[in-house]
Amino acid sequence: MDWRSRKGDKRGSSEDRRLFLDPEHADARITDADLEHLVLLPPCIDPKEWLATHAMNFFTLVNLQYSAVSEFCTAESCPSMTACGKIKCSGPQYVDYVLSYIQTAITDERLLPTKYGNSFPTMFEALVRNIFRLLFRILAHLYCCHYRDVLQLDLHAHLNSFFTHFVYFARHFHLLDARELSPVADLVELLCSSQQSNSASSDRDSAHVLSQKHVGNGDWVE
Ligand SMILES: [Zn+2]
């Protein structure tokens, strides 16, 4: 996916990339909580329930974060977001498409059951991976193309804290491939480096609730 807008536009430029890596902004947080520990599966909690709940909560929060800057994300400011060479559309079109897709998926009782007696479908693992992949792309778009807007709204501390929590969760449960992280790998490294990985092995069994096997995209949003 091309996270940046058209050539020559300051949005998504190397100047903006340096901006979100500036310690003055990157160190801003709304909490000192141990986010790396927070993502671990609590005892006696169904791993799939844990994943489904986080997928829904992260969706809500990404939706809110994007909504705050959505007036700045237009076909003019972000004219081209190309995903995997298959879908070519503007930034706001892509985000609207993705959020609508996820909204439909997480409210489908057959996909993310909430009623007693209903079981998770066999493709649950692929669905959760896909949701996290798409949400991550929106977060990366906020950093790469709208960081000045985020700063202007004084939302960078919230975004940094939320992004760090999201990445820790996705990493722990193997929900994102390294190539998905690569467009903002420097940011991921910077935000997550402040907390040591002293709990990464304590819940290894639950971390592997989702296998490492590649799952075909099928009809997923790319
Ligand atoms: Zn945009």
Image: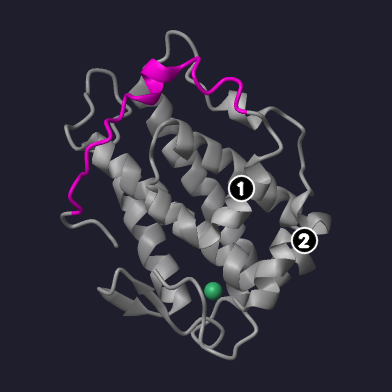
Q: Is 60 placed above or below 183 here?
A: above
Q: Residue furthest right?
A: 24
Disc 1: which residue: 189
Q: Is 200 placed above or below 112 here?
A: above
Mark 1–mark 2 Cα distance, whole angstroms, equals 13 Å
> Local crowd at mark 2 within 10 Å, few (<14), some, or many (≥20)?
few
Mark 1 vs 2, N-terminal side: 2
Q: Residue at x 61, y 21 (%)?
A: 198
Q: Is 160 placed above or below 141 here?
A: above
> Residue 22, which numbered label?
2
Residue 159 drawn at (x, y percent): 66, 52
The answer to whether mark 1 is within 8 Å of ligand 1 is no
Residue 166 drawn at (x, y percent): 54, 42
Residue 95, quarter of the rendered image: bottom left
Q: Residue at x 36, y 79 (%)?
A: 89
Q: Looking at numbered disc 2 in the image, what kind of residue is underneath it?
A: Asp
